Amino acid sequence: MSIRFTAKARRGMVAMTVAAGLALGVAGCGGGGDEKPSPSASASKGSGSKPSAQEGQAETPLAELKGTDGLLLQITSAQRDAGGFVTVSGNLKNDGAESVAIPAQTSGDETEVIKHGQSLGGATLVDSKGKKRYYVLRDTDGRPLTTTGLTTLEAGQALPVFMQFPAPPAGTADVALQLPTFSSGTINISG
C-alpha cells in the first residue's frame, strides 16, 4: 500500500512531530532546563543562583515605564525588521506586594482593537523630529499585533510582551514609547 502526502500534509505532520517533541521535552524537564519558567520562578522568589541571559537584559533595559499599582514595563529591545516594521519587546512586571489587574486603558480606545480583548494595543511610538505618531499594527481582522489576553499579575510576576509598529524612516533611531497609564520613555531602535 502506498500513501502519498501533499506538501501541506507533510508540513502538518512535521509540525505535529515538532510539537509532540517539545511537549515531551517540557514534560521531562526536572526544572532548570526550560528557560520560560526560570524567569518567573526567580522573579517570584526574588533570588536565584545563576542569572539567565533574560535576567541580564532585565538589569539594563532600554527604558522603564512606570505604571499604576507597582506595574513596570521594561523594554529590552526595539528592532527594525526588513518588512518595514519595528518590534518592541520587553517584560511587564508587577513590582508591587499584591496582585494587580492590568488596566483596561492599555488596550487603547479603538473599538476594533478593544473587541479582541485586553492588550497593549494603545501603545504608540512618537517621532518628535519627524512629528509623527505610530500606532500598533493590526491584522486584517483588526487584532493588534501585540501581546493580548492580559488580565492580572501576581506580586513579583513578570510577563514577556511585544508590540509591532510601522517603522519610522531609516534615519530615525530615538523615539518615545507611550502606553496609557504608564510614564513615557525614550527608546533607541536598532537595525
Image (spheres, rainbow, N blue to C red):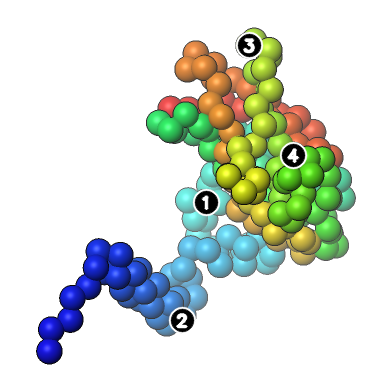
Mark 4 vs 3, N-terminal side: 4
Residues under numbered marks 3 and 1 in contact, where contact means CB atoms less than 8 Å apart: no
Write down the residue under mark 3: 130
Q: Secondary structure at mark 3?
A: loop
Give the image quarter of residue 109. top right
**Above or below — where is 95 with respect to 122?**
below
Residue 62 image offset from top left, x and y in percent: 60, 33
Could you tell me which secondary element the residue under label 2 belongs to?
A: helix
Amino acid type indicated by mark 3: Gly
Quadrant of the rendered structure where residue 139 is? top right
Q: Earlier in the sequence, mark 2 or mark 4?
A: 2
Q: Which residue is mark 2?
A: 27
Of callouts 2 and 3, the N-terminal one? 2
Label 4, on which residue?
122
Q: Which residue is mark 1?
A: 54
Q: Is residue 43 left or right of residue 99?
A: left
Identify the residue at horizontal 30%, vertical 65% (top origin).
Answer: 8
Residue closest to the eye, 93 or 143: 143
For marks 2 and 1 on the same chain, the one whose residue lies earlier in the sequence? 2
